[in-house]
Image (spheres, rainbow, N blue to C red):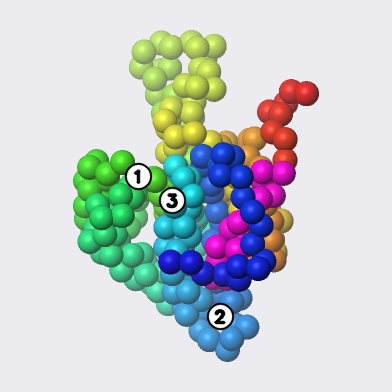
Amino acid sequence: MLFGKQEDRPVLDKNNIPVHIAAIMDGNGRWAQKRGLPRTAGHSAGSEAFQRAAEYLQSLGVKYFTVYAFSTENWKRPEEEVQAIMGLLDRYLRKAIREMAEKNIRLHFFGDLEPLSDNMKKLIAETNEISRGTTGMQVNVCLNYGGRDEIVRAVRSLARDCARDGMPPEAITEELFSSRLYSANIPDPDLTIRPGGELRLSNFLLWQNAYSEFYFTDTLWPDMDEAELDKAIAAYQGRKRRFGGI
């Protein structure tokens, strides 16, 4: 389903679509406050925007879409808001279980899932099982995730190997380190989108974003429609990626 103002949309080069797009879904609370609504209404609108974005990006040929859903720091928010976010995730997972095979979308989760409820873990296990039979775009949901926490966990994993197997520190390569991250075997983001007017990473994919192209916009996440996503991709297509070379 198309959405967004057609006259505002740039023409994309269909031969230069990013393989992996990441997004920080920021601005849900402010979107709601601007409309005199509770912050929970903003998270609901943000969840709908996420689902629309995933379907649209898959239609463009994007292979991986990674979103920042809930950070390790978000537990500090009011209990009502945390529970609302978890409730939205519960509903999304139940919908995904019904529709994943039909839409040919795979779901994968980055983050420490241990603190989640048993019910949430069960739903995640079900989506993982369904994902084994689908071949389309992979949607990575960063849940109870923090970039620094991810790096520390990878370091601990390698340290245990060094202590147990006598592996010398010199044997640790970038590739070996990457294999211990949540994103193992997944290409790094080509494009990372930060809506909401903030100009920071907020502890999101710190290792993986080393050579990502960044797109910042004042648009709040619930308003990230097809036209806004096209602008982000067009900005990416207008850049020359050199990866440190000339």
Q: Secondary structure at mark 2?
A: helix
Q: Which labelled disc corresponds to residue 32?
A: 2
Residue 138 is inside the magenta segment:
no
Of 204 and 99, nearer the camera is 99
Q: Nearer the viewer, residue 12 or 149?
A: 12
The amino acid beneath tag 2 is: Ala
Using the rendered view, name the quadrant where residue 158 is placed.
Answer: top left
- What is the count of numbered marks? 3
> Residue 231, image x and y in percent?
65, 57
Q: Are marks 2 and 3 in contact (CB under 8 Å)?
A: no
Front: mark 2 or 1? 1
Magenta residue span:
220-238
> Tag 3 or tag 1, which sits nearer the N-term?
3
- Predominant SS along the magenta part: helix
Residue on which the image places disc 3: 58
Judging by the rendered image, the residue that carries numbered circle 1 is 136
- At 44% from the left and 52% from the top, the residue drawn is 59
The residue lying at 66 percent from left, 43 percent from top is 237
- Residue at the spot 31% in from the left edge and 41% down from the top edge: 135
| Amino acid type at mark 1 | Gly
Residue 225 belongs to the span the image colors magenta: yes
User: Compared with residue 130, is residue 45 higher up or lower down, i.e. above or below?
Assistant: below
